Image (tube, grey):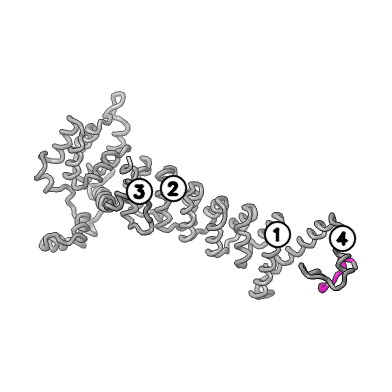
Amino acid sequence: MNAANMSDTDIPIDGSPYDDGAETEDFASLPLELEPEVASQARQTLLKRLADVVCLPETRVNSFERAVTADLLVEMLREAQTPERRRVAKRISGLSEVPNSLAQLLLVDDIEVAALLIENCETLSEADLYYCARNATLAHQQKLAARKDIGPILSEVLTETADVTVVESLLKNPRAVLSQTAIEAAVALSQKAPELTGLIIRRPELRPSSAYVMFWWAEAEVRRTILSRFAVNREIMQDAASDVFSMAAQEGWQDPLSRKALQFIERRQRNREATNRSPYESLEAALSEAATRGLTRQAAEEISYLSGIKPSTGAKILRDKGGEGLAVLCKATGLKKASLRNLWQALRRPLEKEGDIHPDLARVLLVYDLLAVDRAQTVLRYWNWALSSALTPVMLRAISTGEGLDMEQLTVPERAALLAFAEDLKT
């Protein structure tokens, strides 16, 4: 019997013996060099027909028939050639609903196959995209990051890769919606990949907590954007808590939670108690003397106390290479430009270059002019309140010894502190 005129009941079943030995012998006796050609033609036609069935409208095929057909198509595609899988992927990319088993198989296929779905199929479910992000290659993740619609969950998975190219594509994608966790991951990555800061600052999901931390390693232009966009005033909070200050004072400031919050809200920045105990008459006097004698560690700590911040926060500002943090400190504490120049000189930074004001100092003075006092206080107090207060003994030990920290268990201020102070504490 010729294989070409076999009926459906004549198809050999894999692994089953034939009662009629002649039929088995006739089928097996086909020339081996002809089998691939015959199989290729039949396979390609069958793959096309099955894909056509999957693509039929609901008026022609119900969901159960579509699912069974898709399962059969999946089994064939597992051993099909790449061009065959690519043709099927292209055929189903326009479907309003791609069967789950078929989508997941093709989404983790070779990138030339998977890209046809990732780039062109707008109706893939979030579960299918999540599966692709978790189980496919970096090339797949790069394609996913540039996809038209990216939800918060998928954005988190993609930022977990910590791959700069993936995160860069995601940040450039205007149709992507980034979760707060994804933004924090991008900010953390930008510490080693500063080219990302310019993209992060343009994201609408960026919040002050992340922006204030990214400030420390951002370039000058991004820093100015952070200070102009996120340096908010506290008038509403001050009005809402105006009568609470007297309540807390009557209680002797015993409640640490309310005391900490009120320290952030209050209008006064300088510490009057520190001024009364200080060997310097004022903060201005301390800076003037430091400009003449140089800035010692003791003087730096005293300046921090007089400014109403902790020494760890003050040290971070004074070590800042860009210098914009100095402008924030001086504006927040009500210092004049002369005091900012004294602080600049105390840090042994150049005041002039070729007879003109040094470009670095000019840039910092410009930031000083752009900031309002209340807005500068918001930034300075966030640095002091959130960063330094989050440096618990446990975190300090973990950072200094290199012990692992569970980032998911940390609060936003603790994660900020870990990013902003980790390198300082290791050196």
Q: Nearer the viewer, mark 1 or mark 2?
A: 1
Q: Marks 3/1: CA distance?
A: 48 Å
Identify the residue at horizontal 33%, vertical 48% (top origin): 399
Visible residue check, residue 369 = no
- Identified by mark 4, the residue type is Leu
User: Label 4 belongs to which residue?
Assistant: 30
Screen quadrant of the C terminus: top left
Q: Which mark is residue 199?
A: 2
The residue nearer to you, when weighing 80 against 21, is: 21
The residue nearer to you, when weighing 20 against 38, is: 20
Q: Marks 1/2: CA distance?
A: 43 Å
Q: Residues within 10 Å of mark 1 (few under 14, many from 20)?
A: few
Q: Which mark is residue 79?
A: 1
Q: Nearer the viewer, mark 2 or mark 4?
A: 4
Q: Marks 2/4: CA distance?
A: 63 Å
- Identified by mark 2, the residue type is Leu
The residue nearer to you, when weighing 337 against 115, is: 115
Q: Which mark is residue 419?
A: 3
Report the number of numbered marks.
4
273 on left or right of 77: left
Circles 3 and 1, Cβ within 8 Å, touching? The answer is no
